[in-house]
Amino acid sequence: MSETEYATSADGTRIAFERSGSGPVLVLVDGAFCFREFGPSRDVAKELRDRFTVVIYDRRGRGESENTLPYAPEREFEDLRAVIAAVGGEASVLGQSSGAALSYRAAAHGVPTTRLIGYEAPWVGLRTGKDGTRKQYHADLDRLIDAGANDKAISYFMVDMIGAPRFVPLMMRFMSRKAWRTLLGVAPTLRYDAAIMGSEFTPPAELADVSVPTLVLCGSKAAPEMLAAQEKVAASIPGAEHAVLDGQTHQVSPAALRPQILRFLLEKTD
């Protein structure tokens, strides 16, 4: 395990990160629930550190990073900017799930990104309830978290917002006590992911301001609305490429990501 380092964000929040490998700098941005000790980033780093200096960090409110309030998506853009500054001042960025949305939006706001890759930003729109009206994601999620119902907030985020099958939260609950306790502990930060996705859960107009080479990825086994969302993201970012990884789901294999990452980040600049 690499040594933990710290960057200080614009509002004074301390953000924990680590780096491994050698080569061009690549920063990984996690999605909902995830941080260095919980989620895909460390396995992705292991897959890529033979070609890159891979940086992984705990988003604010998770792991060893602090949580300064009030929250706004801009604070997380500043967090990413601070991490990049701490590792040299510019970097390529790879975001997964809502971390992809964060990465796209941060680049649109001028965070110094040389090349950008996103995997399945879940801009899948607002789903409807049984009565046909659109669900109010932010208000519903706030109400559950404010009531201390973190378990229900997890289920609501996974099923109602993202569209996972209803058995998924049950599987998460029983996979291990430690993992479930971790999920309960980070559940309040689901508000942050919801804020990053925006009020309508659709690609924001600001993606037109992304001015760096961008690759938009998704898996062939994604739900139709997820596939459509990635097409919209690619169409929204000037000059963006779009590729589909055969046989991959939202839980993409690091080995499946590797060829696209090497091609996009290295072959065009060698």
Image: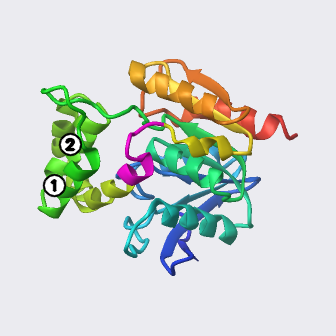
Element at label 2: helix
Q: Is residue 201 magenta?
A: yes
Residue that badge 1 annotates: 144
Dot 2 or dot 1, earlier in sequence: 1
Q: Please, what is the three-letter code of the amino acid marked with disc 2?
A: Tyr
Q: Is residue 38 something that shows in the picture?
A: no
Percent across and percent down for residue 259 are 66, 30
Percent across and percent down for residue 111 are 66, 59
Q: CA distance from mark 2 to mark 1?
A: 9 Å
Percent across and percent down for residue 199 are 37, 46
Q: What residue do we see at 56% from left, 33% from top?
A: 233
Q: Which residues are magenta?
A: 193-202
Q: Is residue 57 magenta?
A: no
Q: What residue do we see at 71% from left, 56% from top?
A: 91
Q: Please, what is the three-letter code of the amino acid marked with disc 1?
A: Leu
Residue that badge 2 annotates: 156
How packed mark 2 is, by other alpha carbons closer than 10 Å (few <14, some 14-19, many 20 or more), is many
- The residue most toward the bottom is 12
Q: Nearer the viewer, residue 41 or 143?
A: 143
Q: How many marks?
A: 2
Q: Assess whether mark 1 and mark 2 are in contact (beta carbons under 8 angstroms).
A: yes
